[in-house]
Image (spheres, rainbow, N blue to C red):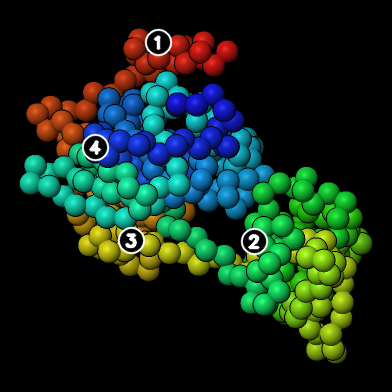
C-alpha cells in the first residue's frame, strides 16, 4: 500500500488531478472485506483502487469495535479488529493499491463502452471496468442522546463508540443501552474503569444470552452496577461532565460520571447508493450467488451490504464473495481473454512481490 504509517491510522490525501483515475475495479469500502478484495484483485491480475467515506481504513470494525476479539478468521485463533485490518493491509501491500479516504461515492454512470464513471462528493472521478461495493451496511449513524446539553459534550465526554479502552482508565463510566454492543463494552470497560454503571430502560435485554449472563455475574460480584432507568439529564459545570441524572420508577437519581457511552444502536443509511437503480431489499443489495453481481451487470456487492438466501453476516463470507465476484469482474476488464489468470501459491511473480514488500517494510 502507499504508506509506511500505522495502517489503521493511515489516511491518503485525495488526488488533486481532475482527470479520471483509470482502474480495472473500483472498490467502495476499506473495511476487512474491501481490503481482502484488493489483495484478491492483485492475485487475479486486476488493478484496483479503494475509496471510503471514513477517514481511516478498517471500516465499521475499527470504528465500532477496534479492540473486540474476532475468533472466526481461518488460521488466526484470535485477533482484534484493529489487528485484523493491520494484517490485511500488510497482505495487500505488494500490489500497491491506492486508498482514497474521506471520499463519499455519489453517482455512477455507465458509458457507451461499458465502463463506469464514478464520482465522489469531494470531486474525485474514477474510470472503472467494474465497481465492487464492500460498504458494510452503508453509512452507520448512531442513535444519539436526545438531550440539549449532550451535543456540546460529544466526542469528549459523551461518546457513541469506544475508540480505546485506555481512555477510560480510572474514570467513572456510564454505559447506556441494552444490546450486544452495550453489554460487551460494559463488560470490557469494567476492567479499566474506576466504577462502571450500565443503564438500561428495562431489566430485559436484546443481547445474546451469554453476554447477559456474564453481565449478571459481574454485577453480583460487585465488578459493575446495573440501573434500570433512562438518562434524564447531564450535569457538566464548566463544560466537563460530572454526573448524570437517571429517571427511574421511584424517582430521579444521580450518579457520578466522567464518561457516558451511549450505545442505543445504529441506523444504517445506504446514502447515494440507494439511487443507483439496484435491486435493494431491506437496505441490502440483492446479488446473484454465482458471482455476487447486482441487478446492474458490472456492479458487485460483497460483505454485509449483499443479500441472498441464507446470507451469513460473517467476515469470512465476505472474503468468499469478493473472491468469486472478482473473477466475473475480470471478464469486464479483459473481455478478450477466455479465463482469469490466477496465481498459485507457488507463483514466482507473486512470491517476488511479497518478498520485495517485506524487504521494503524492514
Q: Which residue is mark 3?
A: 272
What distance separates the C-alpha of mark 2 from that of mark 4?
Answer: 38 Å
Residue 160 image label:
2
Looking at the image, which is closer to me, 135 or 4? 4
SS class of the residue under badge 1? helix
Q: Is residue 69 left or right of residue 196?
A: left
SS class of the residue under badge 2? loop
Q: Is residue 110 left or right of residue 12?
A: left
Do callouts 3 and 1 mark residues in contact (Cβ within 8 Å)? no
Do callouts 4 and 1 mark residues in contact (Cβ within 8 Å)? no
What distance separates the C-alpha of mark 4 from that of mark 3?
Answer: 22 Å
What distance separates the C-alpha of mark 4 from that of mark 1?
Answer: 32 Å
User: Which of marks 3 and 4 precedes in the sequence?
Assistant: 4
Q: Which residue shows up at 58% across the image and 70% down it?
A: 143
Q: Position of residue 318 (x, y in %)?
A: 42, 45
SS class of the residue under badge 3? helix
Q: Which residue is mark 1?
A: 352
Residue 19 image label:
4
- From this view, report whether residue 255 is shown above or below residue 352: below
- From this view, report whether residue 298 is shown above or below residue 140: above
Residue count near mark 2 (Cα–Cα under 10 Å), binned few <14, some 14–19, many ≥20? many
Amino acid at each position: 500500500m502507499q504508506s509506511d504509517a500505522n495502517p489503521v491510522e493511515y489516511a491518503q490525501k485525495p488526488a488533486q488531478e481532475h482527470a479520471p483515475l483509470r482502474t480495472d475495479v473500483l472498490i467502495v469500502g476499506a473495511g476487512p472485506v474491501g481490503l481482502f478484495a484488493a489483495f484478491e484483485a492483485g492475485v487475479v491480475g486486476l488493478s484496483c483502487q479503494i475509496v471510503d467515506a471514513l477517514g481511516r481504513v478498517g471500516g465499521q470494525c475499527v470504528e465500532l469495535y477496534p479492540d473486540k476479539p474476532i475468533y472466526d478468521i481461518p488460521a488466526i485463533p484470535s485477533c482484534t479488529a484493529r489487528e485484523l485490518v493491520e494484517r490485511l493491509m500488510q497482505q495487500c501491500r505488494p500490489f500497491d493499491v491506492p486508498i482514497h479516504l474521506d471520499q463519499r461515492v455519489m453517482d455512477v454512470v455507465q458509458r457507451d463502452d461499458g465502463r463506469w464513471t464514478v464520482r465522489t462528493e469531494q470531486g474525485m472521478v474514477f474510470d472503472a471496468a467494474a465497481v465492487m461495493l464492500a460498504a458494510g451496511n452503508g453509512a452507520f449513524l448512531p442513535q444519539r442522546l436526545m438531550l440539549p446539553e449532550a451535543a456540546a459534550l460529544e466526542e469528549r465526554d459523551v461518546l457513541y463508540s469506544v475508540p480505546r479502552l485506555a481512555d477510560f482508565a480510572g474514570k467513572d463510566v456510564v454505559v447506556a443501552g441494552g444490546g450486544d454492543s452495550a453489554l460487551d463494552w460494559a463488560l470490557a470497560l469494567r476492567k479499566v474503569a474506576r466504577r462502571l454503571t450500565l443503564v438500561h430502560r428495562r431489566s430485559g435485554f436484546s443481547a445474546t444470552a451469554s453476554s447477559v449472563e456474564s453481565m449478571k455475574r459481574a454485577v453480583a460480584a460487585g465488578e459493575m452496577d446495573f440501573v434500570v432507568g433512562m438518562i434524564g439529564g447531564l450535569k457538566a459545570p464548566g463544560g466537563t461532565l460530572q454526573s448524570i441524572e437517571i429517571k427511574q420508577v421511584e424517582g430521579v437519581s444521580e450518579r457520578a460520571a466522567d464518561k457516558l457511552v451511549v450505545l442505543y444502536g445504529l441506523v444504517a443509511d445506504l446514502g447515494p447508493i440507494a439511487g443507483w437503480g439496484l435491486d435493494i431489499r431491506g437496505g441490502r443489495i440483492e446479488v446473484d450467488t454465482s458471482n455476487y453481481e447486482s441487478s446492474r451487470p458490472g456492479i458487485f456487492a460483497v460483505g454485509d451490504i449483499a443479500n441472498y438466501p441464507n446470507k451469513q453476516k460473517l467476515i469470512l463470507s465476505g472474503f468468499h464473495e469478493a473472491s468469486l465476484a472478482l473473477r466475473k469482474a475480470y471478464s469486464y476488464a479483459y473481455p478478450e481473454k477466455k479465463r482469469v489468470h490466477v496465481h498459485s501459491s507457488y507463483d514466482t511473480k507473486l512470491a517476488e512481490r511479497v518478498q520485495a514488500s517485506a524487504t521494503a517494510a524492514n
